[in-house]
Image: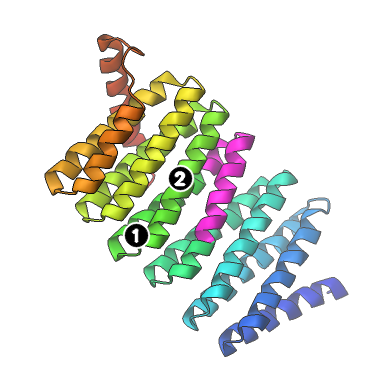
Amino acid sequence: MNENELDEVRAIEYGFKKAYSGDLRGTIEAVDKLRSFAFQLIKLDPNAENELDIKALIISIGDIARVAAKTKMEQACAASGQALGDIVLEAAGHKRESLAVKALSIVGSLALEFVEKGLDSATKGTVESLGECGKYFSKMRVETLVSLSEVYLMQVALKSIEKGLPETGIAAIGFLGEIGVTSAEQTNELSTLEAAVILEDLGNAAVRENSESNAKAIIEALENLGTAVSQYGLKNILVQIEWSLETIRVLTLEWGLKGACFAAKAALESINTTGLLDEEQNLEKIREIKEFHSLILKKR
């Protein structure tokens, strides 16, 4: 074992020691050091040993975050999520996609674990990493990683709605909307459509959980997405968004969420699709939308 490897092992051991003892500053320092080691290794020529070393660092950061969660150090949890998000982007920038997938998957799993424990601040830190990664991959048109980011954000939002953590849910919803807008800017119909479908599903869940704040956030995200889609001429996606908003509006009416119902109605008026497609085209598009719904929601 060379000196660099010893330094990495010492940093991992130090991180666990500080996390178990509840030392916030020490834990964050250790995570930052591990992040730096990962960055150094990512820049080297890839080989099997290098790949294993980086994955060991990624896994260690995730495990340290889990220990920090047990000692209620939410700031350290959030810092770990952000460090992993940085590693995702660094790996992607150096064409190390398998490492990016590994780190992104750990960010997503941490987010779900934190929200399950009701750690609002910790979850928001990981949600931010998922959102920023999703937007980056959307710009780069890496659809598999956009989809992975979106699915984790959807799962976190659903769990937040179920557990009554509105701030976390609203943060995840906001990033889903931003990923959709970024995809629209790239005229990437598949990723944009996926974001719209996920938002509709979340809207239905929010209404059924009687969470008007989350429902309003989803309506706003769909309206913003509709504006972007209209600007970039994605007419078919605009039909989907109108369908989504109308579905949510009807549901809010049934459940008596007057504020959300009014917001959905106003959003529909702002992105009216009249004249874009004829009746036959609309019917065909609705059939395609239903089929796409089933494909997207199988990822949950």
Indicate yes or no whether the magenta region holds residue 270. no
Question: Is residue 239 left or right of 140 when viewed as pictured?
Answer: left
Secondary structure beneath dot 2 equals: helix
* 134 over 63 or under it: above or below: above
Q: Earlier in the sequence, mark 1 or mark 2?
A: 1
Question: Is residue 4 left or right of 251 when viewed as pictured?
Answer: right
* 207 over 187 or under it: above or below: below
The percent coordinates of residue 248 (x first, y second) are 24, 39
Closest to the observer: 12 or 243? Answer: 243
**Residue ID at (39%, 20%):** 236
Within-10-Å neighbours for mark 1: few <14, some 14–19, many 20+: some
Reading the image, the residue beneath label 1 is: 159
The quadrant holding residue 281 is top left
Task: Give the residue furthest to the right.
Answer: 3
**Residue ID at (71%, 65%):** 35
The amino acid type found where label 2 is placed reads Leu
Task: Give the residue furthest to the bottom.
Answer: 21
The quadrant holding residue 50 is bottom right
The percent coordinates of residue 97 (x first, y second) are 66, 46
Reading the image, the residue beneath label 2 is: 176
**What is the chief secondary structure element of the magenta stretch?**
helix
Give the magenta-colored segment's residue range. 126-146
The amino acid type found where label 1 is placed reads Lys
**CB under 8 Å between callouts 1 and 2?**
no
* 143 over 67 or under it: above or below: above
Closest to the observer: 298 or 260? Answer: 260
Question: Is residue 36 left or right of 168 when viewed as pictured?
Answer: right
